Image: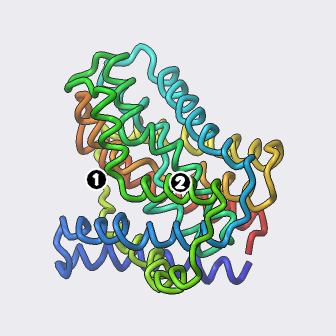
Amino acid sequence: MGAVLAKSSSFLFILAAGYLLKRFGVFGKKDYAVLSKVVLNLTLPAAVITNFAAMEWSAQLLLIPVLAFLLNWLMMGVGLLASRRQAAPTRALFVLNCPGYNIGAFALPFVQSFLGPQAVVGACLFDVGNAIMCTGGSYAFTSAWLRAGGQRLSVRDAARRLFSSVPFDTYLAMLVLVVAGVAIPQGAVDFISPIAAANPFVAMLMVGMMFEVDLKPGYLRQMGLVLALRLGSAVLLAVAMYQLLPFSLPIRQVLAVMVFAPASVIAPAFTVKCGGDAGLAGCLNSLTILAGILGMLCTILVLGVA
């Protein structure tokens, strides 16, 4: 427990440092975009490669992307039910922000620090199915089903958005290599290991710089309900995944942690496209970060991971 608290304190310090350095003008409000490019194009792909190279492969793991994909659809259904009889922009807020998990830039750094390579690969595979929905799948469904503002997202546009993601392409490339039995040269792993090791720090600093909360009274009810739905569902799903799924212990542990990850950083943009309130969507996204930190750390402590 002491090790978990020490590591989590370090993460919280980095998050707070990113936020405070922005507030005091050391970083500009949009400087997080630079770190985002570093994470998505360098440190995160390096972390994916080094952990895939150290894993033990099993064909059973291919079920994880399917599970993540179905889980997103389940949470969209939760959002639809919770927002029935509401106006289309409000329904869009629920349908787009109840599902979706920020794995690469948020949950993966936690897993990388607390769990082993097998768990990191489990998180990457979860993000394969999750990314399909986060990068356009959930928006395409929401805009068509609710006829809520904005332009419809075509299959071609959604696919282009998905495959232009360097982390997603890295997931797929490493998955193909591992399934084909192609080993990553140890020299290559050693070469990129320092880059991979930087991923938790850079990602947490970036998230801290992105954090922004504007608690307007009119926002509180909707934000509270979405957060309650995400956290309540996460508790039930974490218990079910840990107790019922036929995977190894590290994989069941990481899946139980994944369901507490914050909402996708793209969700506010899609919410606005569907006619939603930009301030409300952005504030909600930041609050899911706080809820995610709490949920993921509590799960790690309950599972006795470290």
Residue at horizontal 52%, vertical 50%?
127
Left or right relative to 19: residue 104: right
Q: Who's the residue at 54% across and 32% down the image?
A: 75
Tally of numbered discs:
2
Residue in the foreground of this view, choosing between 111 and 291: 111
The circle drawn on residue 133 is: none
State the image coordinates of residue 101 (x, y, percent, origin top left): 49, 48
Residue bearing the label numbered 2: 261
In percent of width and height, residue 209 lies at: 30, 69
Rendered residue at 58%/49% (across/down): 126
The amino acid on which the numbered mark 2 sits, given as a three-letter code, is: Ala
Q: Is residue 38 left or right of residue 262?
A: left
The disc, 1 or 2, on the residue closer to the chain's N-terminal end is 1
Q: Sort mark 1 into few (<14), some (14-19) or many (20+) by Cα contacts within 10 Å.
A: few
* Closer-to-camera residue (25/166): 166
Identify residue for label 1.
214
Residue 265 in the image, given as x and y percentages of width and height: 36, 51
Instruction: Characterize the local packing of mark 2: few (<14), some (14-19) or many (20 or more) Cα atoms within 10 angstroms.
Output: many
